[in-house]
């Protein structure tokens, strides 16, 4: 499996991360920011080992890059898209035909660099926090676990586990949310089960 050539983006000073600007955290510590109502403004591409596995995901990544680097000329942006879409560079797991990629790039450029649809996040760990995976999950369980159990709460926990490279299981969700496995099963919709599978496939 090819190593992700992230240095290529860094050398060209391509922005692929952005923290919330307008949303104010409910709690802010030296390790994390917590947004009680969640935030859609958190864009951190390539922060985990997960690779891009679908056309839909590739297009979303290109939309985010366009949004974060809206000052790039179309030709410059297109070269970035081609680099990301080349399987040999370690960002995607599949080959994409040139014609389809050109159509995708054209569509992204025509959308004008508006903020792409994003998943809502409640907890954002700060860079260089030095916390272990277990320590992070204890914080996540404490903050999200104190809310009333709901489908949104389960989904938020799934996103946090996935973002930190963990495998999502019913048992793990129950442990972190402080409830029984039966309770998790009772609140897991078909959509949540499907998303659980998709998130785990990216690990």
Image (spheres, rainbow, N blue to C red):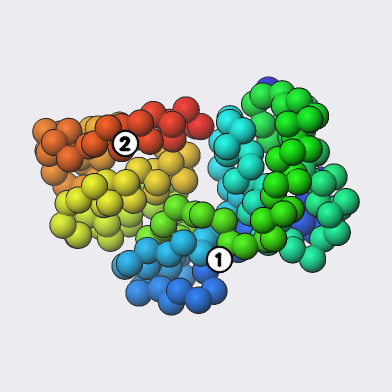
Q: Position of residue 92 (x, y in %)?
A: 67, 31
**Residue 149, above or below 52:** below
Q: Position of residue 144 (x, y in %)?
A: 27, 57
In the displayed structure, does residue 191 sit left or right of residue 67? left
Residue 13 visible in image = yes
State how far apart marks 1 and 2 are (Cα): 28 Å
**Callout 1: SS:** loop
Q: Position of residue 131 (x, y in %)?
A: 45, 54
Instruction: Name the residue rendered at 74%, 53% in the picture.
Output: 109
* Label 2: how many Cα within 10 Å (few below 14, some 14–19, many 20+): few
- Give the camera-side residue of 99 and 63: 99
Instruction: Name the residue rendered at 33%, 57% in the picture.
Output: 139
Q: Which residue is mark 2?
A: 191
Instruction: Name the residue rendered at 85%, 45% in the picture.
Output: 79
- Whichever of callouts 1 and 2 sits on the residue coming sooner in the sequence is 1
In the displayed structure, does residue 111 sit left or right of residue 79? left
**Residue 162, above or below 171:** below
Q: Position of residue 20 (x, y in %)?
A: 52, 69
**Callout 2: SS:** helix
In the displayed structure, does residue 154 sit left or right of residue 185? right
**Residue 90, above or below 107:** above
Give the total of numbered labels.
2
* Label 1: how many Cα within 10 Å (few below 14, some 14–19, many 20+): some
- Give the camera-side residue of 96 and 112: 112
Q: Which residue is mark 1?
A: 19
């Amino acid at each position: 499996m090819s190593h992700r050539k992230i240095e290529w983006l860094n050398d060209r000073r391509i922005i692929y991360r952005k923290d919330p600007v307008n949303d104010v955290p409910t709690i802010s510590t030296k390790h994390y920011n917590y947004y009680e109502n969640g935030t859609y403004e958190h864009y951190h591409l390539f922060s985990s080992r997960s690779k891009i596995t679908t056309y839909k995901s590739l297009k979303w990544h290109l939309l985010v890059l366009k949004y974060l680097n809206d000052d790039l000329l179309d030709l410059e942006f297109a070269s970035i898209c081609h680099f990301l879409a080349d399987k040999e560079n370690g960002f995607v797991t599949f080959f994409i035909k040139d014609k389809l990629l050109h159509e995708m790039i054209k569509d992204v450029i025509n959308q004008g660099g508006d903020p792409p649809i994003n998943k809502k996040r409640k907890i954002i760990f700060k860079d260089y926090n030095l916390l272990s995976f277990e320590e992070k999950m204890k914080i996540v369980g404490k903050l999200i676990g104190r809310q009333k159990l709901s489908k949104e709460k389960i989904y938020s926990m799934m996103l946090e586990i996935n973002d930190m490279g963990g495998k999502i299981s019913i048992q793990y969700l129950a442990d972190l949310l402080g409830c029984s496995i039966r309770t998790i099963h009772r609140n897991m919709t078909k959509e949540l089960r499907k998303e659980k599978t998709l998130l785990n496939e990216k690990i």
